[in-house]
Image: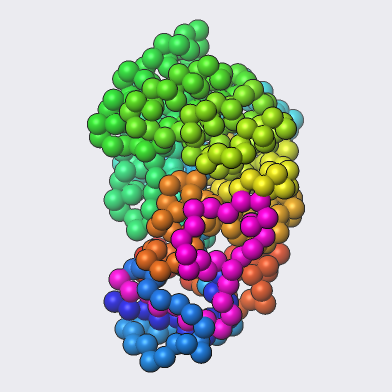
């Protein structure tokens, strides 16, 4: 099967030589080819170049992209999109003055979602979750990481991870699974957090490793949730089971989560709304990707991750949604890219790099997706006719995407 796009106004994020991620000043460069063609063969990017060099290429399908642009599909490296029900009630409570932390202290928050999930069958959880996955594919996401962490019992955590596995088997987008048992301490372990960590390590991790249910391990390293010592215990054990750390740090308070992540070679440290100089310094000369989640800041009205500080320090940065029922009930990467530009002062080039190649790296997919590179999956966004790629974040709140292709197939979910 050969698919040829011709007369592409601009082919964006063209990386003839494979790269892992872009950092610092490089983030401002978004390589592109104007008036381009792109050839897809058997779901992979096979060739590309300027129209002047597109000679007599044969294809089963030819698409004329005059006036339109093509860029790699979004890479969303941080979501919790497998969950049961929603938390609209808490949304209204916050409007009426309660804080996210107060709601959690009153037994709402993550524990509220865990209760709902424990009462939901695996099939029903799958049915609810697949709607969200289909929705984000339509919005242009071509690869996504999904976490457990709303189960908080052995059975319910495994239920979540099995739902993620089913989604991976049934949809063409790449899906990576993360074990986030240490998301909150369940009520019955309220006075025995150590016992809960022991359960995660001794009862869950062996099964997860045996059944290959997750590749990454996460901890909500935060005041009132899990300390740096708790985090270290989980990461240490995770390492023994081959689980790579990708952790929640510095969302509300900076307690040393960045440092412990770096120490354990975390693939990413995510949130970072509260960032100290020492946290920025700890990330220098490492392979750990900082990940910002601006839709979470927007929804909770908390500070935005200081992207300029991070990028101007020469570090890389990825953007992800954090799609979850409590802090970010949206999986829209278009909104994330726009919000990064509008609220975090990232340029369109920086935001698109952060939402494609850097996002791919933050979930170990940089060899498969995130750029226009020969041999990578043809996960592509064909835009509507637009004046420039800067129009994508400029026209915030609306999608400029006309069609989404995953592994070369048009998505009409
Ligand atoms: O990334 N901060 C921890 N976890 C999620 C929110 C969890 C929830 O409120 O359900 C987050 O924001
Ligand atoms: Fe999260």
Q: Picture coordinates of residue 160 (x, y %)?
A: 37, 35
Residue under the image location 61 percent in, 65 percent down: 30
Which span of residues is magenta-colored? 13-42
The answer, for residue 240, to whether it is visible in the render is yes
Residue 56 higher or lower than 260, as above or below:
below
- Residue reaching furthest to the top: 191
From the viewer's perspective, tell me whether residue 34 is left or right of residue 55. right
The answer to whether residue 118 is seen in the rendering is: no
Residue at the outermost front position: 285
- Report the label total: 0
Image location (x, y in percent) of residue 296 = 63, 42
Q: Note whether 36 is above or below 266 in the view shown.
A: below
Q: Nearer the viewer, residue 137 or 23?
A: 23
Q: Which quarter of the figure is the C terminus placed in?
A: bottom left
| Residue 283 drawn at (x, y percent) | 61, 36
**Which residue is pictured at 69% across the width and 30% down the height?**
278
Q: In this view, does 165 lie above or below 1?
A: above
Location of residue 256 by image quarter: top right
How is the model colour-coded?
Answer: rainbow
State the residue lying farthest toward the left. Answer: 210
Please, is residue 107 above or below residue 9 in the view?
Answer: above
Q: Please say whether residue 38 is one of the residues in the magenta stretch.
A: yes
Left or right: 196 with respect to 304?
left
Q: In which quarter of the image is the N terminus?
A: bottom left
Is residue 222 in the magenta section?
no
Point 48% across, 33% down: residue: 265
Q: Position of residue 225 (x, y in %)?
A: 56, 21
- For the point 36% across and 20% down, which residue is it? 201
User: Which quadrant would residue 392 be assigned to in this image?
Assistant: bottom right
Closest to the observer: 95 or 310? Answer: 310
């Amino acid at each position: 099967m050969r698919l040829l796009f011709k007369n592409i106004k601009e082919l964006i994020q063209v990386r003839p030589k494979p790269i892992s991620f872009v950092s610092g000043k490089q983030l401002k460069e978004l390589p592109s080819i104007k008036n381009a063609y792109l050839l897809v063969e058997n779901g992979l990017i096979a060739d590309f170049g300027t129209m002047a060099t597109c000679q007599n290429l044969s294809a089963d399908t030819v698409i004329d992209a005059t006036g339109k642009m093509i860029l790699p599909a979004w890479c969303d490296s941080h979501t919790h999109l497998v969950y049961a029900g929603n938390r609209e009630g808490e949304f209204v409570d916050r409007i009426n003055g309660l804080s996210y932390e107060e709601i959690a202290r009153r037994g709402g928050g993550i524990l509220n979602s865990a209760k709902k999930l424990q009462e939901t069958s695996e099939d029903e959880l799958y049915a609810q979750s697949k709607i969200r996955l289909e929705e984000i594919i339509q919005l242009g996401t071509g690869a996504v990481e999904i976490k457990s962490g709303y189960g908080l019992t052995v059975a319910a955590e495994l239920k979540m991870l099995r739902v993620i596995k089913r989604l991976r088997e049934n949809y063409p987008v790449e899906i990576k699974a993360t074990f986030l048992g240490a998301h909150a301490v369940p009520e019955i372990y309220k006075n025995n957090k150590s016992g809960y960590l022991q359960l995660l390590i001794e009862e869950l991790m062996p099964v997860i490793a045996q059944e290959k249910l997750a590749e990454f391990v996460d901890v909500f390293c935060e005041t009132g949730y899990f300390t740096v010592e708790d985090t270290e215990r989980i990461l240490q054990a995770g390492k023994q089971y081959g689980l790579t750390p990708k952790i929640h740090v510095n969302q509300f308070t900076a307690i040393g989560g960045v440092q412990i992540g770096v120490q354990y070679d975390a693939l990413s440290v995510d949130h970072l709304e509260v960032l100290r100089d020492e946290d920025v310094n700890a990330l220098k000369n490492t392979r750990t990707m900082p990940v910002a989640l601006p839709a979470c800041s927007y929804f909770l009205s908390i500070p935005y991750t200081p992207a300029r500080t991070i990028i101007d320090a020469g570090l890389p940065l990825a953007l992800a949604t954090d799609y979850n029922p409590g802090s970010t009930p949206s999986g829209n990467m278009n909104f994330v890219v726009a919000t990064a530009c509008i609220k975090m002062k990232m340029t369109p080039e920086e935001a698109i790099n952060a939402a494609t190649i850097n996002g791919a790296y933050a979930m170990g997919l940089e060899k498969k997706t995130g750029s226009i590179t020969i041999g990578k999956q043809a996960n592509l966004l064909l835009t509507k006719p637009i004046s420039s790629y800067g129009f994508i974040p400029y026209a915030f709140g609306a999608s400029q995407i006309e069609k989404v292709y995953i592994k070369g197939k048009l998505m009409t979910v």
